[in-house]
Every structure is written in structure tokens, then in C-alpha cells.
Image (cartoon, helix red, strand yellow):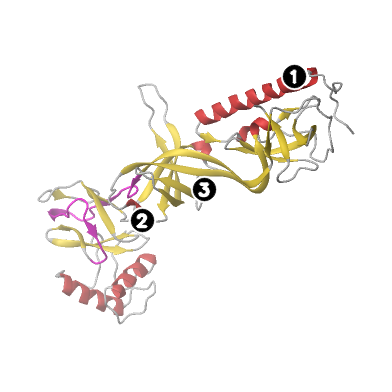
Amino acid sequence: MGLDMEVAPAGSRPHRGRGRKIAGLVVAAVAVGALVAAVNGVDGLSGLSGLSGLGGGGRTGATAGVLPPATTQVTRQTLRETRDADGVLGYGPATSAVSRRPGTVTWLPDSGAQITRGRALYKVDNDPVVLMYGSTPAYRDLRIGTSGRDVENLERNLRALGYTGFTLDDEYTEATADAVLRWQDDRGLPETGVVELGRVVFAPGRVRVDSLTAESGQPTAPGQKVLGYTGTTKVVTVRLAADDQRMAKRGAKVSVTLPDGTSVSGKVTEVATVIEPGEGQNASPETKLEALVSLGRQKAAAGLDQAAVDVTFTASRRKDVLTVPVAALVALREGGFGVEVVEGNASRYVAVETGLFAGGRVEISGYGLAEGTSVGTPA
């Protein structure tokens, strides 16, 4: 089963010239595809990965009359289709602390201050609003007889602060109230045994004050923003197009390049859909993906509170595959692609199946191809 190609007599060159012209057209087309991909920020030609040859099971094709001007070897490697995106190094999105009690703001922390468990986040009427750790926000008074995740959060924090004598569960019992009384006494709060709504703010961990919305001496009311806070761990925020979701999956590994050129490994921890208002009077809003990326080494970002960084996502990965430069592909008359295998002073065409295109190389498979096989390329 040979390939339907014309073979020129020995010493003649028309077939090689024609074959190379065809190959040149393919290389030119692929080069244009690479340029389009580069403009769109894609490191690779994933859009071409669906092209295939005449079947990787094909044996040898027609012999060539003239050797190619240059050769390269088939290599075995891991190909990655990557995408670069702009990111911002900081502390992630800010959360607003909203007053739940009427009164007067009497104390606020400094912007940038870090607040830990049991400390005052701010004060109203000179009584502290205390930070505690937990995933469920405070939404009601906690007293004997109440139960739920917020009760468990409270008890876990009381125990961490050194108050014991109760069972750690989701039930607010008399023993819990006794621990609350001791805590209120130590904090100079009215000793009621009840944690009224607005006395504590639950956050996932210690926080960093990002901005101040209220002013000391200003009256406050339920629903009024007092300050904004973030976590204390530096993260990278990246905005992507909605159709890039396959790259920004939770748990996906990325590479982050800092302003000084240092490369740090990272991992996508959160992905959310956000709506960006359109620019201009008649512009429509755009749907975007916002990804948060944790850094593998926090020390690498020491001294940087906020900075522009580059984030490299890996969309596709093909491990331990045979590859050649894209320019080594030759268009076959029957359709699809092949490579020109060079053996000593002779060469022959072999049909190939193409896989992932990335970084100027392409994954191939074909009969008789192996690592180290010499194939023709343009000069």
C-alpha cells in the first residue's frame, strides 16, 4: 500500500520541488496559525490538533528523489499547551465588616493591621467587636437553647482562647453560657451569658485590614460598612475570558513570574464568575472568570504588597510522546500530513497522526517512527 505520489527518475528534481512547495504551503499555513495563536496568548496550535494523517498504521510511502535541505531528529518529550495571563499579586478580594449594632464608632485599627482571634476588629460605644475564626457568619443572638454551626464556631474559639468546661458540639448549653460569662468578664463586656448579634465577626482566619469605610466618632447603624478586610496570605488574582474555564480549574497547577523574573509554582484555589461593566455608554457587560492562585513559596513575594505578575496556565499536557518541529510536516496528496524519513542517502515519506501542537512542536505517531529517527526539514 504505497502513497499516491509521483516519483521522479533518479537525478531529476521536479518532484522534490513540487513536494517542497506543498510542504512550504503547509508550513506557511501552520506559521500563520502560530501567529494567530500567539496574538491570542496561546502557546501552541491547539486548534490544529484535530488534523490527522492517512493513518499512523500506514507503512512506507513513496521515496524522494532529492534529500531534504536539512534534518532533525524525532524526540520523546512532554508537550504542554500553555496560556499566559496578567495577574495581580495582593491579598485577594476584600470582605466588608458591616455593623450590626447602633452606636458610635469609638476605635478603628490602622489600614494594613493584622487582627487575630479574640482581638477587637473595631469598637462601638467603646465595646469591642471581636474577631473569631469560622466559616459560618454570625447572624443571630447565641444563647442557651440555640444550636447550629455558628454555636460550634463560638465554642471552638472559646476553647482556643482558653475557656473550657463545655462539650465542643453545636449545642449552646449552660456550660457554654458559663464559659461565655468568663470571656465577657475578661473582655470588660456586660456579663449576660448571651453573645448578642454584632458582638463577634467570624472570618476564615486572621485578617488584614484593607480599607476603612467609617471614621472614629462617626455614628453607625445596622447594615453600615465599617471596614474591609482580607486574608493575610498573598495570592494572585487573574481575570480570564469565560471560555478559558478549562484552564482555570480549581486545583490546577500554574507558574507565576514575579516582577524580578523569579518563577514560583502556584495552584488555583478558587474560581468565580464575575460581571465586568462594559466600557462606554452603549457597551454591554462582559462575563469573566476570576481565579485566585496561591503561591507555593510565600517568601518569594516578601516585600511586595501589590504587584503585576504573569501567570502561565497549562491547558493540555501530553506526557512522553514523539514530537517533531511543526515545520517537519509535509502535506500529502491523499490528505493529511506525513514526514520525510531520511535513511543514509535516501528518504521516504511516512504518513503520521498528529496530536497536540505546542511550543513550535507537534505530537506525531506513525509506522516505524521512533525516538532518534531523522526527518527532513526546510533549510
* Of 214 and 117, the residue lying toward us: 117
Badge 1 crowding class, 10 Å Cα cut-off, few under 14, some 14 to 19, many 20 or more, is: few
The residue furthest bottom is: 165
Residue depicted at x 12% and y 58%: 125
Residue 259: horizontal and vertical position, in percent?
Answer: 35, 42
Region in magenta: 89-118
Q: Earlier in the sequence, mark 3 or mark 2?
A: 3
- Of the residues shown, which amino acid type is indicated by label 3? Lys
Q: Which residue is mark 3?
A: 249
Residue 335: horizontal and vertical position, in percent?
Answer: 78, 27
Residue depicted at x 76% and y 33%: 53
Badge 3 crowding class, 10 Å Cα cut-off, few under 14, some 14 to 19, many 20 or more, is: some
> What is the secondary structure assignment of the residue under circle 3?
loop
- Of the residues shown, which amino acid type is indicated by label 1? Gly
Q: Reply yes or no: does residue 103 show up in magenta.
A: yes
Q: Which residue is mark 2?
A: 298
The answer for how far apart the CA atoms under marks 3 and 2 are is 22 Å
The answer for how far apart the CA atoms under marks 1 and 3 are is 48 Å
* Of 115 and 195, the residue lying toward us: 115
